[in-house]
Amino acid sequence: MYSKSELVGKTQEELIKLVLDMQFCNVNLAAEREKNLDKIANLEEILRLKTAEKFTPSTEQTRSLFDELELLAQFEAIKNGLPESEQIVVEAHTRKKHKIRENSTLPASTPVIDVYNYEEAPSEKVINGVLYKRVEDKTIDKVYIVPQKYVVVRDHYLKYEPANTTDSEDKSVVEFKNKKLDGLAATPNFITHSVISKFDDYTPFYRQSEIHQRAGLTVQRQKLAGWIIKYYEELLPLEKVLKKQVYSSALLNKDETKTTVLNVRAKSGKVSQNSFMYITIGTTFNEKESNFHTLVLCEYIQGRSKKVLLEDIERFNYKEPVITDGLKPYLHIENHGTCWVHLIRKFKDVLKVTAKKKDVNASILVSIYTKLSNAHYDLVEKLKNKEITKEEFLKQRREKSEPLIEEFFEKIEDIKSKYSSSGLMGKAINYALEYKPYLSLYLDYIEGTPDNNSCERIAKCWATGRGNWLFSDTVDGADASSFFMSLVETAKRANIATNDYIEYVLTFAPYGSEDDAEWEKMLPWNIDLNRLNKHRALISQAKVDENRKEPYILCGNSR
């Protein structure tokens, strides 16, 4: 704008020029304003996407673990034959489908008792002037909770003292099966409860201590942690056998997730941010059972260098396929495949950023992957149900998958020139092209999957627990945590109740044995749960000592 004094004395031509300049300037400002508004809208979408995930590290986000079939509906009806520039995508109106509620259930083995809510049962009764005849009772099954119950197990061990001695020093001998564990004031059943509470229910030790206190048991969190570490130390041979079995599997999946160990410090003196829980899953197809034998190995590691991540692969000379999330050090593995989900996640991010106006190309690519994933898992179900053989599975999966993979990368080639390499879509396309050689490896192996979801789910469990556990104090604590998490996740994949498997291992593990064959009996497909049920039946006979007035002092063999 010009002041009055600036306009005085100007000729008509000069005034016209000033007016034209002002109009031109306004047009430029309007165009710039529109451009900036678009930028702001785009940045707001990116910010919304980022803040929506602020509590979950990118490697542990599970938003892509499940098929997003709703993305397909928009594009199935796109008119054939029209160039994309002329296609109009109209989102169809769909009525929200109500979720079918599942009935509350309890196992058939649950104890049951009949309660009769009447004193007299006449065969006939007049109600509101109408004569009614009695029929079969109306029964309603209801759930009743028996509060947490404790049993004192008084273990007896043979004890001997020297026959001839006047020495006041105690030289007695007690025949323990395992002195370190038999002397604890906690049974394998109690340790199992604590392990499951922490690593499956995400309840930290201080909360467990409070829960026990409410039920009448006083036990400090330090004692709970100490007991678990002692059991871990005695089960180290099982950890060695577990690792050996994992690296004997037909296929491995690998991933890693951050953890915190307080006494591991960086050079600055601060708690190291370079601590990780390393997840390895070994899978082997058992043709006789038409099922997969799966073992989970969690380990505490420092750093994610090539040397650290590939150490055991080289030590065990593992040559079978390995599927990962595509982290750069893994690319040095000779027989290596990468996860489709990590690729598709990038295209789903594009869809979230462009939520108001969906990117058609990104949606089409996501829909192709959904078909690819469904083709695999549909065949897996048929294989497990013995509807198809191993050979038929491999043949049918390849026939269904290869055309979809070709279609996916043909689409990539068609659209790559339309996007800037620095944009979200451009980066997703470049990632797809970079990892293309590794994405089809799974088709060669019956144990192969198009994703690394098995590891991702465990990483998610660890991340969920991390919010409750917060940290490990020491490396020993991190090692013990990773070992028991291995047992919990192995039990889940073997379809064994976690409390059954953990208690079986803690109760019957061959303590002190150096024979790997003995420890292999603790693998999930080798255990006999009837042994555990007999042991539990004995405990169920416990009765209250009516004559006892003093509380039981649980202090192990120190008294």
Image: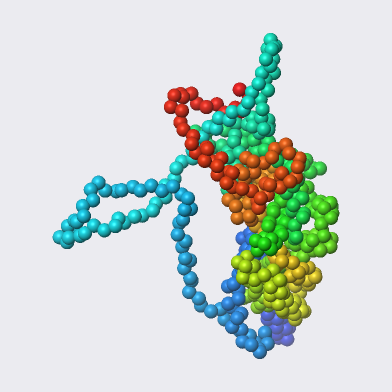
Quarter of the image where one finds residue 54? bottom right
- The residue shown at (59%, 36%) is 187
- The residue shown at (64%, 30%) is 183
- The residue shown at (55%, 26%) is 553
Instruction: Say whether residue 393 is left or right of residue 318.
Output: left
The image quadrant where one finds the C terminus is top right
Of residue 491 and residue 333, the one placed in the foreground of this image is: 491
Of residue 381 and residue 426, the one placed in the foreground of this image is: 381
The image quadrant where one finds the N terminus is bottom right
Quarter of the image where one finds residue 60? bottom right
Q: Does residue 154 lie above or below 267 as drawn?
A: above
- Residue 325: image location, x then y, percent: 74, 61
Of residue 394 and residue 34, the one placed in the foreground of this image is: 394
- Residue 400: image location, x then y, percent: 68, 76
User: Can see residue 371?
Assistant: yes
- Residue 198: image location, x then y, percent: 60, 44
